[in-house]
Image: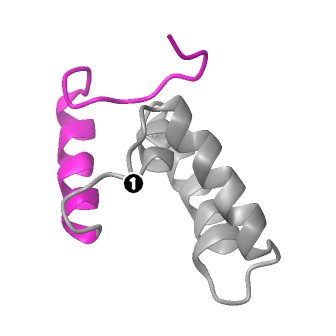
Amino acid sequence: MSRIKSVTPESATEIQKDLLANIKRQYGGVVPGVYRIFLVDLALGKPIGDIYQYLHLRKSSPLTKLQREMLAVVVNGIVGGAP
């Protein structure tokens, strides 16, 4: 059992299910683990998603590739290994 809450398709509300479906379409049929964590609190999901985009996905990220990979390993391990 993880100490960090995450949204699964089984536990998702209707709004969360819609968002999960949209994210799945954007990421080729999978939901990255970090988004499953963001969706727990929808009021924080957007600002946290923006921070994720800024730190992890942009080409000029202040994090090194190794740091980004380490974050991905931790988050994916917490939420059950999503790609």
Is 28 inside the magenta-drawn segment? Answer: no
The single residue placed furthest to the bottom in the displayed view is 59
At horizontal 17% and vertical 52% (from top left) the residue drawn is 21
**Is 46 situated left or right of 67 in this image?**
left
Q: Position of residue 6 (x, y in %)?
A: 44, 28
Query: Position of 72 compared to 10: left or right?
Result: right
- The number of discs equals 1
Camera-side residue of 12 and 4? 4
Please identify the quadrant where the C terminus is shown. bottom left
Out of 1 and 10, give the one closest to the viewer. Answer: 1
Residue at image x 17%, y 32%? 14
* Residue 68 against residue 58 in the figure, above or below: above
Residue 67 drawn above or below residue 31: below
Single out the residue that lies furthest toward the top.
Answer: 1
Relative to 1, is 23 above or below?
A: below
Stretch of the chain drawn in magenta? 1-26
Which element is circle 1 on? loop
How far across and down, in percent of the image, does residue 57 sit? 58, 75
x then y, percent, for residue 55: 70, 69
Quarter holding residue 62: bottom right
- Residue denoted by label 1: 83
Residue displayed at 26% across by 49% down: 19
Q: Quadrant of residue 10 in the image?
A: top left
* Amino acid type shown at disc 1: Pro
| Residue 20 magenta | yes
- Measured as percent of width and height from the top left, residue 4 is found at 58, 23
Residue at left 77%, top 63%? 67
